[in-house]
Image (tube, helix red, strand yellow):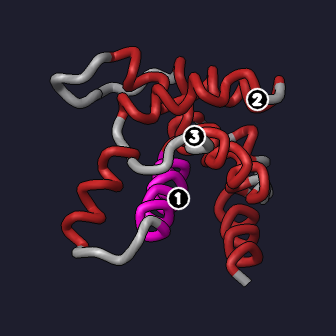
């Protein structure tokens, strides 16, 4: 049901434009939400506790430094197509970036989000899961 909705929206709003053709910042925009959902699901899987503590743990996953580190954990597992999407996201000209943050971390995080956005909009949910599991394969806790 949900996949049909997104397909319909893309066809209506983007006239059937392939996710590959979307701006890397658009891909990062949706990829940020996808990655956030994965992070929150991971935190929830570690056990029930107060929401403010779960939110603090999710923030440890969804920040530029952690996302940059996540990219380096999966970069050798990326296909050529996925690596190209990542590079497009990393190299995109964002007019702003948060203060007190390393610009390289921010760019790698944007590339990772663009990759997850691309995979999501392409309907490659199994690949999203595979990559996220690679990132956290050895981590027992956050």
Which span is picked out in magenta? 29-45
Circle nearer the N terminus (2, 3): 2
Which mark is in front, 1 or 3? 3
Question: Is the residue 87 above or below the residue 32 in the image?
Answer: above
Outermost residue toward the right? Answer: 80
- Kindly identify which numbered label has been placed on residue 138: 3
The residue where tag 2 is placed is 78
Instruction: Point out residue 53 in the picture as x, y percentages from the top left corner.
Output: 22, 64
Q: Residue at x 73, y 21 (%)?
A: 76
- The residue lying toward the viewer, choosing from 46 and 126, is 46
In the image, residue 42 lies in the stretch drawn in magenta: yes
Task: Say which residue label 1 marks.
Answer: 38
Coordinates of residue 104 in the picture (x, y in percent): 40, 15
- CA separation in Å, label 1 and label 2: 19 Å
Seen in the image, is 8 located left or right of residue 62? right
Q: Position of residue 25 (x, y in %)?
A: 51, 37
């Amino acid at each position: 049901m949900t996949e049909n909705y997104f397909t319909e929206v893309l066809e209506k709003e983007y006239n059937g434009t392939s996710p590959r053709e979307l701006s890397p910042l658009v891909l990062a925009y949706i990829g940020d939400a996808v990655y956030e959902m994965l992070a929150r699901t991971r935190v929830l899987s570690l056990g029930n506790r107060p929401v403010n503590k779960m939110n603090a743990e999710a923030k440890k996953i969804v920040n530029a430094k952690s996302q940059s580190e996540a990219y380096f954990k999966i970069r050798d597992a990326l296909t050529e197509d996925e690596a190209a999407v990542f590079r497009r996201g990393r190299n995109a000209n964002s007019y702003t970036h948060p203060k007190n943050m390393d610009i390289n971390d921010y760019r790698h995080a944007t590339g990772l989000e663009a990759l997850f956005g691309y995979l999501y909009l392409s309907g490659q949910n199994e690949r999203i899961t595979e990559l996220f599991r690679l990132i956290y394969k050895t981590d027992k806790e956050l």
